[in-house]
Image (cartoon, grey):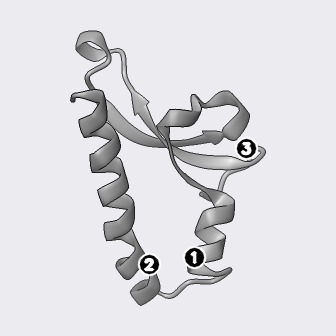
């Protein structure tokens, strides 16, 4: 989430593959991302991880992000 973009978000980028069936995580400006594809905002990450999270805090947080991504992809039917 360390991006020069204004209000960066982590989002699912559905690539141009077979009808947009390839998905990858990317970071971009919130205003330029389709909101239903947003997984995590910088503000939420800072709220939940703090300014300087340690590796244990990050390791405990990543499964939550993975669950959100999996759910979002399954809703889209990929």
Query: Crowdedness of circle 2 by 10 Å Cα count: few (<14), some, many (20+)?
Result: few
Quadrant in which the C terminus appears: top left
Q: Is residue 41 above or below residue 76?
A: below
Q: Which numbered disc flags the more N-terminal residue, 1 or 2?
A: 1
Q: Which mark is residue 58?
A: 2
Quadrant in which the N terminus appears: bottom right
CB contact under 8 Å: marks 3 and 1: no
Rounded to the nearest whole Å, what is the CA distance between mark 3 and mark 1? Answer: 21 Å
Q: Which mark is residue 25?
A: none
| Residue at image point 34% right, 49% down | 69
Residue 43 in the image: state x and y as whole percent.
69, 63
Q: Nearer the viewer, mark 1 or mark 2?
A: 1
SS at badge 2? helix
Q: Is residue 1 above or below residue 52?
A: above
Rounded to the nearest whole Å, what is the CA distance between mark 3 and mark 2? Answer: 22 Å
Query: Crowdedness of circle 3 by 10 Å Cα count: few (<14), some, many (20+)?
Result: some
Residue under label 1, please give it. 48
Asked if residue 50 lies left or right of residue 31, the reply is left
SS at badge 3? loop
| Residue at image point 35% right, 15% down | 16
């Amino acid at each position: 989430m360390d991006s020069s973009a204004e209000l960066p978000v982590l989002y699912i980028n559905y690539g141009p593959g077979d009808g947009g069936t390839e998905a990858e995580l990317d970071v971009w400006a919130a205003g330029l991302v389709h909101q239903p594809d947003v997984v995590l905002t910088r503000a939420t990450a800072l709220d939940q991880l703090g300014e300087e999270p340690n590796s244990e805090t990050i390791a405990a947080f990543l499964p939550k992000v993975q669950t959100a991504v999996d759910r979002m992809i399954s809703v889209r039917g990929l």
